[in-house]
Structures are given as structure tokens and as C-alpha cells.
């Protein structure tokens, strides 16, 4: 964040509660937020915490840039979910009504590589060309990063710990390739790998493949995670989806994963009989020996 507390911060808001948490935290410390809610994803409640809130039903970099420029934004951040699978829908251009800048990014700058990091770094460069620097929302909200430990009353079994360790290696490799950050594991076999669909649909698919007979969800950061975007995030919806799919353990990377509404998440996991573990490489390695 800027050293000047009165300087506004720009916020591109996707779906979920993270943008709300960020905006509320900024307001509480006196930082004005200039927010643009993206293509039907931004929560209208953001207007309660932002000095400027603009909602757009299309994806337009020009609209965001002009809004930020008008209100003196020099630093900006992004928070919340973007549903990338919608970018591959046959009617996507009618749905999103992208401006020329988006079309140029998709068809010209990223024709040979449309992985998350490649696309988002291209967006960041567009803003840099306008003199606006991207920063991580976690600079203002470091308390959201989960600390190491078993967070629930339920402890993972010895077999589940081995599945966590196995899944850790697989998930890190998927992250290195910028495919996804989550894998679903049962008995040292990968049931499903997260890609453009996101974590929750991947959990549902894994449950269908093992007839809801119990499996482990492992979610990690990429080996070279850029915290300005795409930080692994779990919340109450993750736990509820796991319960419906028959998953029994959620393992996330300590110090690298956002845990939203942590008390509600842990209470729900305890009620539904799901173990939640925040671990690191050393913990995973110890389970392999």
C-alpha cells in the first residue's frame, strides 16, 4: 500500500467475500477505495465501504482505467473470483461485451499462452503503461493468511495424512505448470485436478468418481506465487461443497492461503465432520517418512 494514507487505492472486484473484506479493512484505516465491480461479479454491498463504486456488466479495461484515472488512483489491486471457464463459452463476446483492449490481450498478446499468470500479467502491464502500479491486497490484510496447524477438532487419520503428502507433490506440480492449485486424492491416487472450472466443481467431480466415499482436498500456492493475483482462497462454500461431495479432509498451505470467515469455516467443518489442516513442505515431508 502507499505510504500516503489519504491516497486512494483502486480495486477490481470479482465475486466472493474477499473484496468486501479488503474494502472494509481499507475504510477502517482511512484509505479511500475506488472500486469497479466486474461483469456481474462484484457485490453491490461494496458501495458501503468504497468512496467510489462503479458496477459494469461488461469486461472493459478502458472503463476501469478511466475510472481509476478520474479519481487519482496510482496504485490498485484485484480481489475476488473470476470464472475463467466462461471465457470459453461460444457466446462469450455477447455475454461480456469486451472492449478493444481485452480483445487485443486475448487474440494478439496471448494467442499462444492463455494460462492465468500470462493473462493477468498482461493486464498488469496495461495498467503500468498508464502509470498505475498493481499491489497485493494481502499487504493490507495479512491476517487472512492461515497459520500452520490442525484447525479443527477432527484430526486426519494416518492414511489421510499420507494422501495429503501425496497430493501436496501433485498440486505443487500442477501449480508450477499454471494449470490449477488443487487436487483431490484418495488412497494415493489423484481423483481430479482443478483447471479452469475452479475448486468447487472439481470437488464435486471427485465425489462423483468415488461415490462420495471419502477423499482429501489439497490446495496449495504455486511454487512462484504472485500474490498480486490468484492467491489460493477457501471459505464456507468450500466446506459446504466438500460435505455434499463426501470429502473428509481439507489441506491448505500455511502462510500462503486465504481463509475467509475463519471462525465460521472451522465451526462448519467441526459440525460436518471435516478435518482442516494448514501445513507446509516440512509437514508434508514428515508424512512421507
Image: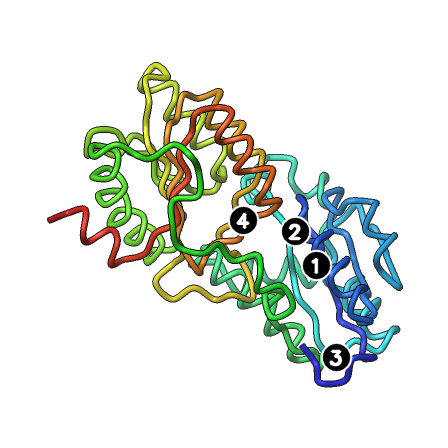
Q: Are marks 4 and 3 in contact (CB under 8 Å)?
A: no
Residue at left offset 15%, top offset 47%: 288
Residue at left offset 62%, top offset 44%: 261
Q: Which mark is residue 259?
A: 4
The mark that comes first in sequence, 2 or 4, is 2
Residue behind mark 2? 18
Does residue 179 appear in the picture of this structure? no
Residue behind mark 3? 74
Q: List x then y, in percent, for residue 140.
A: 65, 68
* Above or below, comparing residue 133 to residue 141 in the picture: below
Does residue 242 appear in the picture of this structure? yes
Front of the two marks 1 and 3: 1
Q: Residues within 10 Å of mark 1 (few under 14, many from 20)?
A: many
Q: Residues within 10 Å of mark 3 (few under 14, many from 20)?
A: some
Residue behind mark 1? 22
The residue lying furthest to the left in this view is 289
Q: Secondary structure beneath disc 4?
A: strand
Q: List x then y, in percent, for residue 277.
A: 38, 44
Say left or right for 133 vs 115: right
* Above or below, comparing residue 96 to residue 217 in the picture: below
Residue at left offset 36%, top offset 42%: 218
Q: Secondary structure beneath disc 2?
A: helix
Q: Which mark is residue 73?
A: none
Say left or right for 158 vs 93: left
Q: Residues within 10 Å of mark 4 (few under 14, many from 20)?
A: many
Amino acid at each position: 500500500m502507499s505510504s500516503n494514507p489519504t491516497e486512494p487505492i483502486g480495486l477490481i472486484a470479482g465475486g466472493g467475500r474477499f473484496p468486501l473484506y479488503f474494502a472494509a479493512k481499507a475504510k477502517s484505516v482511512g484509505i479511500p477505495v475506488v472500486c469497479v465491480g466486474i461483469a456481474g461479479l462484484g457485490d453491490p454491498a461494496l458501495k458501503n465501504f468504497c468512496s467510489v463504486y462503479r458496477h459494469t456488466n461488461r469486461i472493459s479495461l478502458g472503463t476501469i482505467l478511466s475510472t481509476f484515472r478520474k479519481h487519482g488512483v496510482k496504485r490498485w489491486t484485484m480481489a475476488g473470483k473470476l470464472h475463467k471457464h466462461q471465457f470459453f463459452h461460444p457466446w462469450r463476446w455477447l455475454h461480456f461485451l469486451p472492449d478493444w483492449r481485452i480483445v487485443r490481450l486475448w487474440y494478439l498478446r496471448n494467442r499462444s499462452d492463455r494460462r492465468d499468470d500470462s493473462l493477468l500479467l498482461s493486464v498488469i502491464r496495461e495498467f503500468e503503461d498508464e502509470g498505475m502500479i498493481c499491489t497485493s491486497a494481502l499487504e493490507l490484510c495479512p491476517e487472512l493468511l492461515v497459520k500452520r496447524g490442525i484447525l479443527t477438532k477432527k484430526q486426519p487419520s494416518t492414511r489421510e495424512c499420507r494422501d495429503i503428502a501425496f497430493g501436496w507433490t501433485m498440486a505443487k506440480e500442477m501449480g508450477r505448470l499454471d494449470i490449477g492449485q488443487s487436487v483431490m486424492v484418495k488412497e494415493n491416487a489423484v481423483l481430479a485436478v482443478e483447471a479452469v472450472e475452479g475448486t468447487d466443481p472439481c470437488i464435486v467431480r471427485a465425489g462423483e468418481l468415488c461415490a462420495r466415499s471419502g477423499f482429501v482436498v489439497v490446495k496449495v500456492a504455486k511454487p512462484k506465487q504472485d500474490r498480486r493475483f490468484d492467491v489460493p482462497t477457501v471459505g464456507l462454500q468450500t466446506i459446504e461443497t466438500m460435505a455434499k461431495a463426501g470429502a473428509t479432509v481439507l489441506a491448505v498451505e500455511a502462510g500462503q492461503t486465504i481463509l475467509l470467515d475463519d471462525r465460521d469455516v472451522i465451526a462448519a467443518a467441526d459440525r460436518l465432520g471435516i478435518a482442516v489442516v494448514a501445513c507446509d513442505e516440512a509437514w508434508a515431508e514428515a508424512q512421507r517418512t
